[in-house]
Image (spheres, coloured by chain):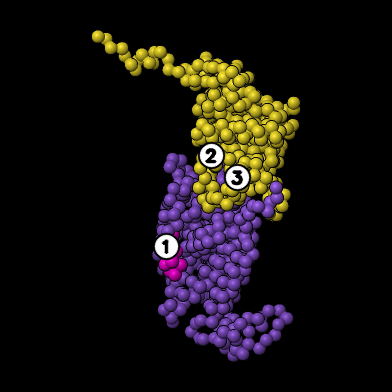
């Protein structure tokens, strides 16, 4: 496998506070790496650094080219982001929204070509969105919207796909549908996926490899069963959990209350 | 899979043709009506006669020709340029700031330009006759200063920032600049009439000089804004996402806002303060034709021109022979319209 993405000693600071500190990360081509960590660990900032949206120290190399040497449009043709909270322009239709994904491919003056429209039509069809093309984005349900935002990212035809907690707003069925979709698209299109993930069980099921961030540093990295460790999770999330093997190679993380907490909130009758 | 099944929004040629026809009708009506009645077919003939390689006898007398070409047409053309520029600048500000309420007059641009123009009138010599004299220049830098102050104050608000925050900042900036302007004006009472007439907005005291004075600025501003239409559509998903799509939001905003301010300041310098054009025209187009800036901006140029020509027609005919300041006419229609936009845009974040 070849290296799709490699970060060396990446640091991000805002107003004297360190958000990311010397993060090293390598993602192979075609691999799916899940970023986990408590709120404020720096997951979103790491993804934003890779899209060029925040300034950072250290180096990010994308498919062999240093990010700082790339033009914005070139970077956008290499890396697409599905944001956690997409901004929905009032009155914009799905087809126009997905067509925005072609922006880095369009000329300075010319409009979309036949090819650009074909790409958009194909992406809409692949995500079963053809019937939604004329709907306004602000009228979509959570699951529909998530597919539309992914469609925009796919229309960029970038080999690297970043997903920032793509399923947080979805119910359990939609979560699975969206992540299965990402997985099948990854295989069909040979995409490299780096996703920030909120739900640890989901993180234990889909990515090939996990990276745990906490306080802006990488605290664990490896296969799901190595990273999803009760002690690590207690230390960095402050949560008591039990870990189960689902019997199919995935991992299930279940939050459990500690006996002390249960005793404290339900004092035994003393009589 | 072919692209035939998808229909992205775009500017249909017949929409644009319809807008041009509206503009043509507005020009014709405005050139017919006035204190002296001109015959419609003669006016059309006279207009055609001015085209290159065409020679038609219009049948108008020399005096009627003079009324048409030295009195009415300069005013109509100037009104068209001013209206087109204000409308397209309004659309440009709305796209740049992702704010449906943005308008040259609500962002402190006009108040800043007004202060600059007042300084030029009060302290400057013989400004009206100089095509590149101090008035447009001072109005321009005043406009830039006004929008910069509004932007700085509006975006220094961290918590609870909404579409309205920027507008409130604009109100504060405009109030301050207007206070300074009023002070200067009162201290120099001998120019009071000139300054006051300018503030109310007028297209009434013009010949072709003003047209040639403002045209280059208006053309440059309009071309730059239209060239940015596609990028303004990208900005509508927010700065962070625009970056991931390969667009530099800061640079787009800088270029488009500079162009819009250049155009606004130039037209304000010759026509005074004519408000609400930048709200009414782009929003009506959005409601009727769609929200893409590739639709809104080109149509704003044409329909903005038609709108102001008709507003000026009202201003000079409704209580003829007296004239109402055109700024009064646009505010009369614009203020209620603004209230409607405010209602429908409730909850929009900035």
Assign a secondary structure to mark 1. Answer: helix
Quarter-of-image position of residue A176: top right
Quarter-of-image position of residue B215: bottom right
Name the chain under label 3.
A
Residue sitting at x 43%, y 77%: B318
The residue tagged 3 is A129
User: Where's residue B223, x and y in %?
Assistant: 64, 60
Q: Estimate the spatial distance between the alpha carbons at disc 3 and disc 1, rounded to whole Å.
A: 41 Å
With respect to residue A85, does A230 lie above or below?
A: above
Q: Which mark is residue B335?
A: 1
Which chain is purple in the picture?
B
Residue sitting at x 50%, y 47%: A139
The region drawn magenta spans B328-338
Picture colour for chain A: yellow
| Callouts 2 and 3 in the same chain | yes
Q: Is residue B271 magenta?
A: no
């Amino acid at each position: 496998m070849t290296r799709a993405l490699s970060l060396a000693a990446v640091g991000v600071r805002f107003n004297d506070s360190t958000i990311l500190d010397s993060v090293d990360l390598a993602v192979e081509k075609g691999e799916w790496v899940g970023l986990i960590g408590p709120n404020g660990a720096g997951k979103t900032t790491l993804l934003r650094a890779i899209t060029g949206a925040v300034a950072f120290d250290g180096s990010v190399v994308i498919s062999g080219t240093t990010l700082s040497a790339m033009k914005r449009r070139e970077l956008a043709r290499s890396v697409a982001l599905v944001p956690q909270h997409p901004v929905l322009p009032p009155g914009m239709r799905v087809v126009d929204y997905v067509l925005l994904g072609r922006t880095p491919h369009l000329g300075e003056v010319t409009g979309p070509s036949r090819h650009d429209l074909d790409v958009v039509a194909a992406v809409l069809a692949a995500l079963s969105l053809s019937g939604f093309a004329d709907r306004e984005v602000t009228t979509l349900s959570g699951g529909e919207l998530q597919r539309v935002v992914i469609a925009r990212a796919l229309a960029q035809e970038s080999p690297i796909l970043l997903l920032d907690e793509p399923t947080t707003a979805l119910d359990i069925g939609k979560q699975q549908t969206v992540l299965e979709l990402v997985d099948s698209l990854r295989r069909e299109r040979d995409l490299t996926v780096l996703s920030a993930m909120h739900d640890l069980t989901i993180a234990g099921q889909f990515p090939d490899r996990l990276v745990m961030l906490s306080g802006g540093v990488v605290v664990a990295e490896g296969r799901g069963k190595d990273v999803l460790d009760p002690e690590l999770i207690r230390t960095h999330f402050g949560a008591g959990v039990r870990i189960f093997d689902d019997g199919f190679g995935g991992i299930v993380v279940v939050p459990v209350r500690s006996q002390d907490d249960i005793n404290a909130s339900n004092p035994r009758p003393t009589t | 899979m072919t692209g035939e099944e998808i229909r992205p929004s775009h500017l249909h040629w017949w929409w644009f043709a319809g807008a041009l026809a509206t503009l043509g009708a507005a020009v014709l009506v405005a050139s017919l009506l006035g204190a002296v009645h001109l015959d419609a077919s003669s006016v059309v003939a006279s207009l055609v006669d001015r085209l290159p390689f065409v020679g038609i006898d219009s049948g108008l007398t020399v005096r009627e020709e003079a009324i048409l070409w030295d009195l009415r047409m300069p005013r109509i053309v100037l009104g068209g340029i001013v209206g087109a520029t204000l409308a397209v600048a309004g659309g440009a500000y709305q796209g740049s700031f992702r704010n449906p309420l943005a308008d040259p007059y609500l962002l402190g641009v006009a108040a800043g330009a007004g202060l600059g123009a007042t300084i030029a009138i009060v302290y400057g010599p013989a400004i009206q006759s100089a095509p590149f004299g101090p008035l447009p220049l001072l109005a321009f830098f005043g406009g830039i200063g006004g929008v910069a102050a509004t932007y700085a104050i509006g975006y220094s608000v961290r918590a609870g920032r909404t579409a309205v925050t920027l507008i409130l900042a604009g109100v504060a900036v405009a109030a301050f600049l207007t206070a300074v302007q009023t002070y200067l004006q009162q201290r120099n009472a001998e120019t009071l009439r000139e300054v006051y007439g300018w503030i109310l907005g007028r297209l009434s005291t013009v010949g072709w000089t003003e047209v040639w004075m403002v045209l280059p600025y208006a053309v440059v501003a309009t071309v730059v804004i239209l060239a940015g239409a596609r990028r303004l559509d990208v900005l509508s998903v927010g700065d962070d996402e625009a970056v991931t799509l390969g667009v530099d939001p800061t640079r787009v905003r800088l270029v488009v806002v500079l162009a819009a301010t250049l155009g606004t300041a130039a037209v304000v310098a010759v026509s005074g303060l004519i408000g609400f054009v930048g709200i009414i025209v782009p929003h009506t187009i959005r409601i009727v034709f769609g929200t893409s800036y590739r639709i809104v901006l080109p149509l704003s140029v044409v329909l903005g021109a038609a709108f102001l020509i008709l507003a000026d027609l009202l201003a000079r005919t409704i209580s003829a022979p007296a004239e109402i300041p055109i700024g009064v006419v646009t505010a009369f229609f614009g203020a209620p319209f603004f209230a409607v936009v405010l209602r429908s845009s409730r909850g929009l974040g900035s």
